[in-house]
Amino acid sequence: MIDRLIAKIQETKAPIVVGLDPMLSYVPEQVQRKAFAEYGETLAGAAEAIWQFNKEIVDKTCDLIPAVKPQIAMYEQFGIEGLQAYKKTVDYCKSKGLVVIGDVKRGDIGSTSAAYAVGHLGRVQVGSRTYAGFDEDFATVNPYLGSDGVKPFIEVCKQEKKGIFVLVKTSNPSSGEFQDRLIDGKPLYELVGEKVAQWGEEHMGASYSYVGAVVGATYPEQGRTLRKVMPKAFILVPGYGAQGGKGKDLVHFFNEDGLGAIVNSSRGIIVAWKQEAYAKYGAENFGEASRAAVEAMIADIRGALEGEL
């Protein structure tokens, strides 16, 4: 799957991923109104609204981008109906030829971790048959519990030719409370990066590992260090746009081949219709506003890379 992701990045010339992280407040009034007319002001109505919101954004941007990253928490808040919208979103994006990164941040041990891995990336046995559950192409994984929590995902990835992105240095302001702590003279995030590189050696695509890393755009110097620590790991980079990251901050997340990283923007794209820069589109054309935001992001990152690499 890492080879397919790279091929899609090269095809679109866009090393970006759109984060499909819909809050109900992001969904324009006319979309909510239509969903509520059919299902009422219920969890099912909310789920229908975010599904229709996602579908429009995907329809308007899928030819420009290689991948999407739905954040499962935004769907779980609406219960079972929300999870059904999540699954519909995953399936629809795959039908459009997009690589799907399930932002699920799972991390446990033993049979629990194996069940998470099967549910999101593998196939579950039911009698004489097997079924794919959520069936994303990649999943994000929390490594806090150590190898016991990560290896079940790696085993499923080997079977299914899928991949994971392990949290290494996250974009949030308080990430340093644990991740920057020095252990034997090195910050914890660097030790986790070393482990990601080690895990990845056992699960390689043509040029890059199926075991990638999450490193926030808000920490460019750490990104520079971690790029050297994990030369064969693809880096998923959150924190662009709404969290402050810009194209010029991201150059060192990439390798000299112009690959090695994919940059995520969520609110900056899916809520573009609320931003002053895209106000001309209005709520009625929120999908077109998202497309314009994607085009601007591509230009920003492409310009930064062409200027430095």
Image: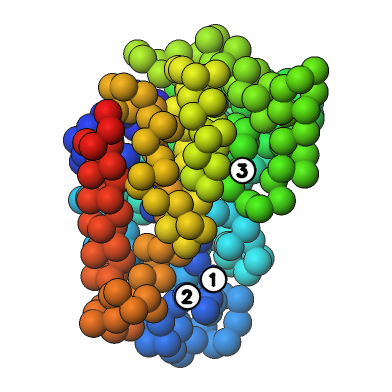
Of the 4 image quadrants, the one containing the C terminus is top left
In the rendered image, residue 10, in percent from the top left (x then y), is placed at 23, 32
Rendered-image quadrant of the N terminus = top left
- Mark 1 neighbour density, 10 Å: few (under 14) some (14–19) many (20 or more): some
Q: What x and y, as percent, mark residue 179?
A: 72, 36
* Residue 159 visible in rendering: no
Amino acid type of the residue tagged 1 in the rendering: Met
Q: Amino acid at mark 2?
A: Tyr
SS label for mark 3 = loop
Q: Secondary structure at mark 2?
A: helix
Depth-wise, is mark 2 or mark 3 nearer the camera? Answer: 3
Cα separation between marks 1 and 2: 5 Å
Q: What's the residue at 45%, 52% (across, down)?
A: 245
Residue 171 in percent (x, y) is at 58, 48
Contact (CB < 8 A) between labels 1 and 2?
yes
Name the residue type under label 3: Thr
Pair 3/1: label in front: 3
Give the residue at mark 2.
Answer: 26
Q: Which residue is mark 3?
A: 170
Question: Taking 177 as reference, is 273 above or below it?
Answer: below
